Amino acid sequence: MSSTRSRSLRDLLRVRPGSKVRLGSIDPAATHGREKAASGAELQAGLDRLTDLQDRVWAEQKHKVLIVLQGIDAAGKDGSVKHVMTAFNPMGCVVTSFKVPTPIELGHDYLWRVHQRVPGKGEIAIFNRSHYEDVLVVRVHDIVPKAVWSRRYDHINAFEELLTSSGTTVLKFFLWIDRDEQRARFQDRLDDPDKRWKFRLGDLEERKLWDDYVAAFEDALGRCSTAAAPWYVIPSNKKWFRNLAIADIVGDTLADLDPRYPPSEEDLTGVVVE
Ligand code: AMP
Ligand code: MG
């Protein structure tokens, strides 16, 4: 077995705080010693572990977990929710997909809508896009001036510090595909009538801005990966590996919380159901 297997994916794929991220040097097709043939069974085992852990998190009503999914268009954010987060009982799991802000949202600071969706005790919240859009699409399209967006990395670190120091576990996944993979996935969306709803002509315009998005992602990953709220770069050209890696890292993180079924709050000794 390959030596890379001796290190956990959580360790291998985590962005070190303060590091300069160069996505060009990260292979989006990497599989780190995992094999496709074994991936079905491996993923199922990972999902079973997630189901068990979340059941305990929900029962215990103690931990709060926030999972952020980001990635360029067609990187697999929706697919990750569908194939990995499906392990969670919908009770205790909330998915929020952040879209273009509404006028009411725009009337507030950009973290306002985000803060409302963070997890409470016992909950796992999944962000499909997030506050990072405010240093990604907003930066690439000059929706606000540089003087405004450039201060947001500090806001975001402070916001996430507030969450983690209040007992929220935060983990952030950047799904990394290359341009060729995006082309293939867009073409597939165009060709398959059942997937056409996912495609918008505007996606082609965004694709032209690939390099700008890469630069924006590199800054967000490098500046906002902290010990308490780490970013993970998930090689995502291979969907089976993406799913395995996310299930593995979320599973290791939840296992570290050691969630337990709580004892009854009442004295039940000798109680019999008639
Ligand atoms: P989708 O995820 O394909 O449903 O698309 C959601 C769209 O909302 C994407 O084009 C995002 O770039 C956009 N979006 C999300 N958050 C923001 C934001 N804060 N500012 C501007 N656009 C955003
Ligand atoms: Mg889209």
Image (spheres, rainbow, N blue to C red):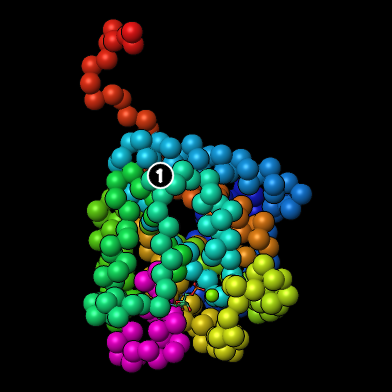
Secondary structure beneath dot 1 equals: loop
Residue closest to the eye, 195 or 2: 195
Examine the rendering and report whether any part of residue 185 can be seen. Answer: no
Ligand 2's quadrant: bottom right
Residue hosting label 1 = 91
Q: Amino acid under label 1?
A: Met
Image quarter for residue 125? bottom left
Name the residue located 61 percent from the left edge and 59 percent from the top edge: 242
Examine the rendering and report whether any part of residue 260 can be seen. Answer: yes
Q: Position of residue 88 (x, y in %)?
A: 48, 45
Image quarter for residue 22? bottom right
Question: For the view shown, which residue lies furthest in the right direction?
Answer: 37
Name the residue located 29 percent from the left edge and 46 percent from the top edge: 121
Residue stretch rendered in magenta on the structure: 130-150
Residue 38 in magenta stretch:
no
Image quarter for residue 225? bottom left
Residue 133 in magenta stretch:
yes
Does residue 215 sit above or below 120 in this rendering?
below
